[in-house]
Amino acid sequence: MRYMVITMRSLALSGLLLLFGCGGLSSRGTPTPPPNGTPQFGHVFLVVEENHSYSDVIGNSQMPYLNNLASQYGLATQYFANIHPSLGNYFMLTTGLDTPSDDLFNGTVSADNVVRELVKAGKSWKCYAENLPSVGYTGNDLVFYPYVKWHNPFAYFTDVTGTSEANNLVSFDQFKSDLAAGHLPNYSFIVPNMLDDAHDGPLAVADLWLRVNIDPLISNPVFQKDGLLVILFDESDGNDTANGGGHVAAVVVSAQAKKGFQSTTMYQHQSTLRLLLQGLGVTSLPGAAASAPSMGEFF
């Protein structure tokens, strides 16, 4: 939020926010939209699917669950990935930069990123990666397939590797127990494995995975009060290079979202990064997120 007229009412609201905070999963009432049009949320979630174009997904009978969400909540009809192959898109979603883009890259990334900004803002975070071999694992060993490092951008960040923040790299099994216990962080990045994200498995399997694993989150009463979920595809199939990474599906789910809304605005991954951070009240935005189009029209 860049501009604010300070009034006695806004000061009173600020005092209430300071009093109650925005940490673990708890019931705190309906979020209030700030001037930029993006409501403030207690918990935001990003689920990344793989390698299918918009036309493969939207309207496809193999994905009834995702299509139902798209029709019930918000759908970005002109959403484009940034690059091919995958890794550059994962970095854009978390750093606002699309390099390096080689999936076999095994170095570190020191650029400003979502972890740095969340920590500075006092927000909690986790990356829930399906089949991650151990808490804090940052290796690139393909022997742990169907988990792969290049779908887990946090494993490259200098803010994470070799620090206590690495403890926030956990298996997706932890998501289920955190949801049940009411201990979800403010920011959750969810990584299905290569079979469940439609990379190596069929779309029908990816859709079933979403229904089994994500529907309990959406139906959670606290998510309905202060939650935001974005489900998107990292890039299109390799034949589509429009705007860098091709036309992909992106669905915005929240009780605060306009019902059945379809946006015709062009967005890319830097706008999702902006949306998730602004939704948590983070004002310092990494890389291209700082100048990306706001997705406030969804609310």
Image: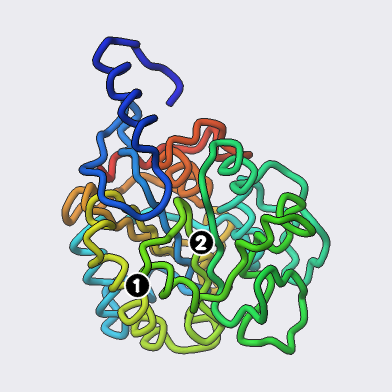
The answer to the question of whether label 2 and label 1 lie on touching residues, with beta carbons closer than 8 A, is no
Task: Identify the image quadrant of residue 68.
Answer: bottom left
Looking at the picture, how far across and down is residue 21, in whole percent?
39, 38
Looking at the picture, how far across and down is residue 181, in whole percent?
37, 67
SS under mark 1: loop
Looking at the rendered structure, the kind of residue marked 1 is Ile
* Mark identifier at residue 214: 1
* Mark identifier at residue 189: 2
The answer for how far apart the CA atoms under marks 2 and 1 are is 12 Å
Q: Earlier in the sequence, mark 2 or mark 1?
A: 2
Instruction: Classify 110 as above or below 145.
Output: above
Looking at the picture, how far across and down is residue 70, in whole percent?
26, 64
Q: Residue furthest right?
A: 107
Q: Residues within 10 Å of mark 1 (few under 14, many from 20)?
A: some
The residue positioned 46% from the left and 55% from the top of the image is 185
Q: Answer left or right for 158 relative to 120.
A: right
Task: Identify the image quadrant of residue 194.
Answer: bottom right
Q: Answer left or right for 109 relative to 33.
A: right
Looking at the rendered structure, the kind of residue marked 2 is Phe
The residue positioned 59% from the left and 47% from the top of the image is 114
Question: Looking at the figure, which quarter contains the N terminus?
Answer: top left
The residue positioned 23% from the left and 67% from the top of the image is 219
SS under mark 2: strand
* Mark identifier at residue 200: none
Instruction: Classify 257 as above or below 207.
Output: above
Circle count: 2
The one of 266 and 15 positioned closer to us in this rendering: 15
Question: Looking at the figure, which quarter contains the C terminus?
Answer: top left
Looking at the picture, how far across and down is residue 245, in whole percent?
56, 61
Q: How is the image coloured?
A: rainbow
The residue positioned 37% from the left and 71% from the top of the image is 55
